[in-house]
Amino acid sequence: IGNAIVGTREEMKQMLDSAAKYNVKVIVDVLPNHTAFDVDAVSDDFYKAVGGRARMFHSNGLTPIKDYNNREQCTLWAMGSLPDVNTENPLFQYYYMKYVNELIACGAGGFRYDTAKHIGLPSDPKDEKSSRNNFWEVATGREAVNGLSLDTSKELFIYGEVLQGKDVKEKEYSKYLGLTASNYGGELRKALENRSFSGVDLKSWHHQANPKQLITWVESHDTYCNAGESSGLTDAQIRCGWAIVAARASGVPLFLSRPAGSSPENRWGNNRIGPRGNDNFFHPEVVAANHFRQRMVGEKETLYYSTDGKVMEVARGKKGAALINLGEAGDISIKTCLPDGSYTDAVHNVSFTVQKGMLKGRVEGLSSYILEVQE
């Protein structure tokens, strides 16, 4: 544990201990299936631990993937020239699980598996060096390796970056861990870019897994950084999208903190490793959506849209509702599950009324509102 970027093991333990005082759980990003580009830079101790260099990589682990829709290439060849580790090697699995258990002992609350769709499932093609694909069985504590099992003495939150695409085995991956709902994020960004909910489907999760297992987002580090796909969205648009994923009954929302000082015109801003990003996650609309999510646990979800497609309502039983306006400022009228009466928004202190199943009020452009029944 520890390197020049994230600091030493002792510094990480200090950070985890500090976070625990505030009931904050830290998820560690792990990448078991790749080593450095330069295989000569991998330590001799690491090679020795896994039985030598020949047992470190898959048979074609140094051959770059040509077809990302080919499961054999996707799970056994090099991704973007990153060498593909033989994750089915019991000696590697034992080495890796010692690392994972040490992180848990330090206070880690779970793990995000980077490039998870590049680690084979039991039904995927096997490497000639392996009799079975059992990495996920071992990594999630279903199976021991050389007498070592995942430490499950604490409740862990584990999910994988399984970006959706052709031939991705979403259902099978979901047997082992939570999954990223990348297609839902894409659909949501369409609405934000068009500033309209017309022509998009935000009810479906666009995924084969149980919605409760999904990690949702407005944007990810990939969509923001790689090609700047989502970097043109303003902070206000991001907040509107966040109000949707946070207010919904399913999914576990993930908020990307953009670089400090960034803007659609300058997406990198003051980008540095270490310092936090911009302050959008502190915005009152984001905070209100987060609190709303926690207070609405267990309440049924119903989605409504205004007739002009500019306003969306995420109603939660008869207890509360989140309003998201992608249009300009103006008066709105939208169906609701809220009981008749008057409501005051938690963020903007704006008044709304409900009468005979219709919610009415005035909203500002690109803004969200949280309404709750006062007990």
Image: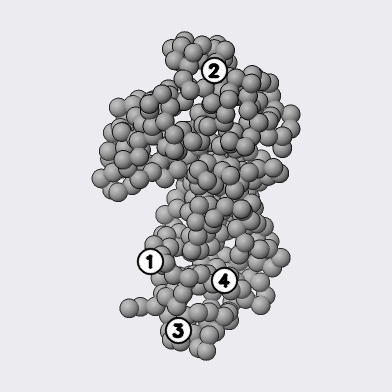
Residue 9: quarter of image: top left
SS at mark 2 in the image:
helix
Q: Any mark on residue 295, and which?
A: 1
Q: Is the residue under label 4 in contact with that under label 3 (CB below 8 Å)?
A: no
Which element carries disc 1, helix, strand or loop? Answer: helix
Q: CA distance from mark 2 to mark 1?
A: 48 Å
N-terminal of the two: label 2 or label 4? 2
**Pointer 3: what residue?**
339
Q: Amino acid at mark 1?
A: Arg
Could you tell me if residue 236 is visible in this image? no
Residue under circle 2? 56
Q: CA distance from mark 2 to mark 3?
A: 62 Å
Q: Which residue is mark 4?
A: 303
| Rendered residue at 57%/12% (across/down) | 54
Q: Amino acid at mark 4?
A: Leu
Residue at image point 32% right, 78% down: 375
Residue 127 in picture, x, y percent from top left: 63, 24
Of the numbered discs 1 and 4, the one sitting upstream in the chain is: 1
Query: Amino acid type of disc 3?
Result: Pro
Of callouts 3 and 1, the N-terminal one: 1
- Spatial CA span between label 3 and label 1: 18 Å
How far apart in space, not on screen, are marks 2 and 4 (Cα)? 50 Å
Q: Is 28 in front, or is 6?
A: 28
Residue at image x 43%, y 12%? 45
| Residue contact between numbered discs 2 and 1, judged by CB atoms under 8 Å | no
- Please identify, in this view, whether the residue under mark 2 or under mark 1 is nearer the observer: 2
Q: Nearer the viewer, mark 2 or mark 4?
A: 2
Q: Residue furthest right?
A: 66
Crowd rating for badge 4 (residues with CA inside 10 Å; few <14, some 14–19, many 20+): some
Note whether 204 is above or below 317 in the view shown: above
